[in-house]
Image (tube, helix red, strand yellow):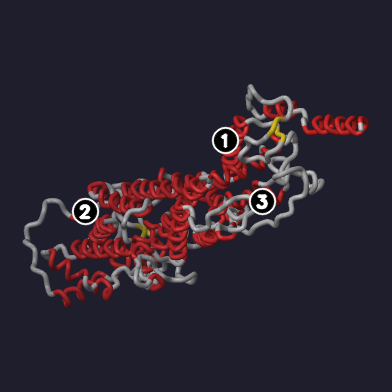
Amino acid sequence: MLRLETILCTFSVLSVAVRARNCSEVREACIEKGFSFSNAPRQEITGDHLRVCPQGNTCCTPEMEDKFGQQSKQDFDNLADEMSHLLRSTFVSRHKRFDEFFLELLENTERSLNDMFVRTYGKPYMQNSEVFENLFAELKRYYTGGNVNLEEMLNDFWSRLLERMFMLLNSQYVITEDYLECISKYTDQLKPFGDVPRKLKAQVTRAFIAARTFVQGLSVGREVAQRVSKISSTPSCIRALTKMLYCPFCQAIPSVKPCKNYCLNVMKGCLANQADLDSEWNQYIDALLLVAQRLEGPFNIESVMEPIDVKISEAIMNMQDNSVQVSYRVFQGCGQPKPAEIIRSARGVSDVFNARFRPYSPEERPTTAAGTSLDRLRIVWNAMQHSVIDIKEKLKLFKKFWSTLPEAMCVEDRVIANNASDDECWNGHTKGRYFPEVQKDGLTNQVNNPEVSVDITRPDTLIRQQIMALRVMTNKLKNAYNGNDIYFQDTSDEGSGSGSGSGCTDVCPTSMSTTTPETPVVKADRSGPMDNSAPPCGHTAVLPTLLSLSVLALHLVWR
């Protein structure tokens, strides 16, 4: 009997010795993590007070478990921030780069046109330069999100150009506002500018729609990435994170890391709402890639804006060549206007316009500030072409970002154990194999998540707002790819193709040849300052008048 009592006593002592493990390793691990627990136990204590970690013998006090919970949320937020850093920084930097380039393009185009017209047209242009300034202001207002209908603006431009040129060509008559209104009704029938307005309108609308929508798309992606990456963790998620990341400390095995599948279930539960963003996000990326193609093709904004003065000059020459026929047909439709008084201003036509047109060769290289600014812009644009290629490659990598985020966060040596053995990882209870199967992605698939209690009936409001923002932007991007501006479409039929865009396909004409190819094209002078002493060219009585009409008409183009 005495021998039996001795054996039982011995087993009891050994049992206590086994259960009462040393917590010194845990204390050292806590210090390495930055914790300062003054009352951390040196030996295991009873764990009845624990609310998250397994009860029983433990190296954790209630204070330690609370601190572990706070640190778990911080670790999770830091990890999510790190995993989404490339995504967020890419959208921020590329949005800034493209936005700055497009604005610089507008400013350089306006500056170059101003320099050229000052050289060519001198005082008359300077006296009316605000008309051009207003045009570029409208283009900039459209680009920056203003409610400007490009098609209507360009139609108005050509109507004003026709009115002003008609007045200059028929200065012997009194042209009233009512008469000008009558003239505008015949613009489509007369086609005084040949085919240039139609082609230029198609190019300008598609180029600006693509540029504006692409930058808007990058802006939306930037905002969505920044907002969604700031994850609002639920109490259930924080409990699961604490259990996964720090309960090994309480079990006196702080160096044991979670099993991968265990980590995946925790992350899928915590990121359930983020995964629901994936479908709309992928469609948004695809639409953004489509519009990026427009920045490389014939409708890119740089190739449209840089020669816009040349294209306008072609239109003016068409009007000059057909001025007699145009005036005759206007008189037929609107009647003969009243003759003006014989008394003329002391200032003659030659005073109004003392420069002259000369044939312009596209091969000529401007040598003035206008030329150098455009040359510099071409260099910038070449670099921008590389940026387009770069952003396309990165966008492809960002597809399925949100659904693959749990996998990205459960990486070896950071969160989970290595693949040496499935039995050497933390399974939420002890060191050993994790048996539950990995859940699928998304909120509804977390109904049976064994690690995180997820209320699938209450989707995250912020995530739903971002899903809607992506859906709206995707629709805009698809419309922009087809040349349609969604802001001016009939909302009853979004697929109708109506709106400010041209609605044409990839086979839209891109050349700016006129309907009268045999007519010599006369352009604004890009070669340098005009010499006022230069002898006038032939037909001195007609050409100066036509030239003055062209200049003043150009001013109206931009109204």
Residue labelled with disc 1: 70
Looking at the rendering, in which quadrant would you find the C terminus?
bottom left
Image marks 2 and 3: residues in contact by CB distance under 8 Å: no
Task: Give the residue type at disc 2.
Answer: Ser
Residue labelled with disc 2: 350
- Disc 2 to disc 3, C-alpha distance: 82 Å
Q: Position of residue 336 (x, y in %)?
A: 12, 73
Foreground of the two, 432 or 325: 432
Between marks 2 and 1 in the image, the one whose residue lies nearer the viewer? 1
**Which secondary structure lies at badge 3?**
helix
* Residue 310: mark: none
Between marks 3 and 1 in the image, the one whose residue lies nearer the viewer? 1
Say whether disc 3 or disc 1 marks the residue closer to the N-terminus. Answer: 1
Query: Residue 78 is drawn in which quadrant?
Result: top right
Task: Give the residue type at disc 1.
Answer: Gln
Total residue callouts: 3
Instruction: Left or right? Give the position of 319 relative to 229.
Output: left
- Disc 3 to disc 1, C-alpha distance: 21 Å
Instruction: Left or right? Give the position of 382 relative to 212.
Output: right
Please tell me which residue is depicted at 39% across the width and 70% down the height of the picture.
494
- Disc 2 to disc 1, C-alpha distance: 83 Å
Task: Give the residue type at disc 3.
Answer: Leu
Query: Residue 40 is drawn in which quadrant?
Result: top right
Q: Position of residue 307 (x, y in %)?
A: 42, 57
**Which secondary structure lies at badge 2?**
helix
Residue labelled with disc 3: 264
**Which secondary structure lies at badge 1?**
helix
Say whether disc 2 or disc 1 marks the residue closer to the N-terminus. Answer: 1
Foreground of the two, 445 or 94: 445
Foreground of the two, 469 or 327: 469
